[in-house]
Amino acid sequence: MIDFLVIGHVVQDVVPDGYTVGGTTTYSSITARNLGREPGIVTRLAPDFVLPEVLHDIAVHRIPSAHTTTFHNIYRDGHREQFLLARAEPLEPDDVPPAWRNAPIVHLGPLARELDPRIAEYFPRALVGVTPQGWMRQWDDPSTSSGGRVRMRPWEEAADILPYVDVLVLSEEDLNGNLALMDEYVRLTRIAVMTQGAQGCMVFANGEARQVPGFPAREVDPTGAGDVFAAAFLVRLSETHDPFQAARFANATASFCVEAHGVTGIPTREQVQARLDGYSGFWG
């Protein structure tokens, strides 16, 4: 039975020796699996895309597409420059298999505006989380000289999506310096979290804003850390109903992710618990 549903494009990320699998769906579903859930992915992929071994034990409902969404990420001085090289077709609410629509946790994870905003309304009994970065992007034509360079855009769909969402997770970088946007998002949804990298995160819940500190980590590759955080937050929130405890758990989970390349650093629940126990006295 699927008890953690992720909807969005599984993507190819360009790496020096070819491609590696990526995207919110990949990082979130692996996190959910490693934390003891039974995840499922709804995505669009080209027929020639071979699901990698890292997605073992994860149910994938793949809908045919002419292309597989493909990104090239370049990190300079802690900032990411991103290029969209190819994009799969969008996903519609009816693409979700009927048997999966009762999943108790749903993570909406668009990467390239591939999700119809109405999809947030389809899960009234679920704990619904969203990482909106895919709705906050625009890009140049990949065939032009800029090669599909990705830029920020206003999240015009926020007011149509957030009233149906329980948890919003975005990064300080997603706000592009406009922290006033967070006030609007907090007003529209039940729980909002702004991640702040190594510093941890700010949680807005129950009329309170609270800083939850991060965990020391030796950063190797920050790709996917926000998605790992979001999945871990949703899993722990469903267990404890405490957003601040969920944030601490998610910070610990994400701290493992940055210490290795790609999905290889996503930890097990036992590893997360050991890190939490190791810092229990430090954080109080």
Image (cartoon, rainbow, N blue to C red):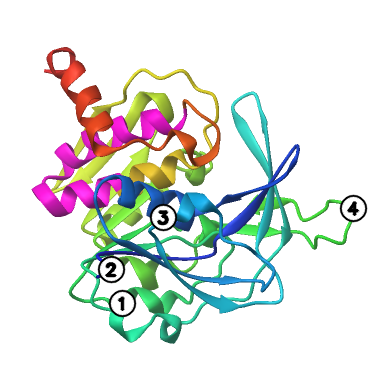
- Residue drawn at x 82%, y 53% as measured from the top left: 147
Viewer-proximal residue among 163 and 133: 133
Report, in whole angstroms, how far the alpha carbon at label 2 lies from the one at label 4. 43 Å
Provide residue 23's location: percent of width, then percent of height: 53, 53
User: Mark 4 is on which residue type?
Assistant: Ser
Assess whether residue 240 is covered by the magenta stretch.
yes
Tell me which corner region of the image, top left, top right, bottom left or bottom right, holds residue 190.
Answer: bottom left
The secondary element bearing badge 3 is classed as: loop
Instruction: Read off the magenta span.
Output: 232-258
- Whether the residues at callouts 3 and 4 have beta carbons within 8 Å, the answer is no
Q: Is residue 183 visible?
A: no
- Sequence-first disc among 2 and 1: 2
Q: Position of residue 87 (x, y in %)?
A: 68, 66
Spatial CA distance of label 2 from label 1 is 6 Å
Residue labelled with disc 3: 131
| Marks 1 and 4, the one that precedes in the sequence | 1
Residue under label 1: 100
Residue 42 disc label: none
The residue positioned 24% from the left and 65% from the top of the image is 3
Please state which amino acid type lies under the numbered disc 2.
Answer: Ile
246 relative position to 55: left or right: left
Task: Quickly name the residue at label 2.
Answer: 2
* Residue 189 placement, left or right of 241: right
SS label for mark 4:
loop
State the mark number for residue 145. 4
Give the class, few, some or many, for how many residues have Cα within 10 Å of label 4's Cα (few <14, many ≥20).
few
